Image: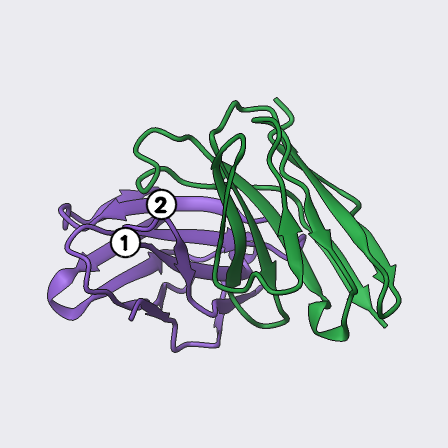
Chain colours: A purple, B green
Amino acid sequence: AQKVTQAQTEISVVEKEDVTLDCVYETRDTTYYLFWYKQPPSGELVFLIRRNSFDEQNEISGRYSWNFQKSTSSFNFTITASQVVDSAVYFCALRDSNYQLIWGAGTKLIIKP
Amino acid sequence: NAGVTQTPKFRILKIGQSMTLQCTQDMNHNYMYWYRQDPGMGLKLIYYSVGAGITDKGEVPNGYNVSRSTTEDFPLRLELAAPSQTSVYFCASSYGGGAAYNEQFFGPGTRLTVL
């Protein structure tokens, strides 16, 4: 069965701290795609990154970085030097061969000033 | 480009009423999707479409219907609304080529309450 687990329901840190959001997935497909989306308090969904199952290189984009490890079926997301504007719910999602996105329950990130 | 637009933004329905949630995209995307997001949860796929005239069920299709007569529009119909359909509904679209790879672009959502 396809499944995405985001075990951290809510994380609260003080501004400028680093924070890592965990994502663990389950799939039997050999080809799959992983995504992270951000949902700020305004409610819209903002695409952050995608990663395919053949590319295990870590990705860095400014203060954001992603660590994809097939051996542990994880695709973790780290924010360095967090800012109040990073406060949002972050979703990890898995796209299977049927083109359907399987979503985790999300992690609510609170950045305190 | 307006991207993906949804109307209405908010709606309150009485049990048993029907309504149509509108979704339009101007990016010429082949793939379109309808999701629902219950409080504190991730998104669940209701229906999706890979092109005009083609639709298919997702994870939670019961109580909903869709049609796709044009590339741009993908309306979601609720028949006989029930309190269990209280949710936020998101429409999304993606480019058709290599669809599994391409990210989905989301509309702003419709918050529906059924009382």
Residue where numbered disc 1 is placed: A66
Q: Quadrant of the N terminus of chain A?
A: bottom left
Q: In this view, does B71 lie to the left or right of B65?
A: left
Question: Considering depth in this image, is B49 or A109 the residue closer to the camera?
Answer: B49
Secondary-structure class at tag 2: strand
Residue where numbered disc 2 is placed: A49
Q: Which chain carries label 2?
A: A
In the image, residue A103 sits, relative to residue A52, either above or below, namely below
Q: Where is residue B32 in the image (x, y as percent from the top left)?
A: 52, 39
Secondary-structure class at tag 1: strand
Q: Where is residue A59 in the image (x, y as percent from the top left)?
A: 24, 46
Is residue A22 at least partly visible in the picture? no
Q: In which quarter of the image is the C terminus of chain A?
A: bottom right
Q: Which chain carries label 1?
A: A
Residue found at x 70% / y 74%: B84
Residues tagged by mark 1 and mark 2 found on one chain of the structure = yes
Q: Is residue A89 left or right of residue B13?
A: left
Residue contact between numbered discs 1 and 2, judged by CB atoms under 8 Å: yes
Disc 2 marks a residue whose amino acid type is Ile
Q: Nearer the viewer, mark 1 or mark 2?
A: 2
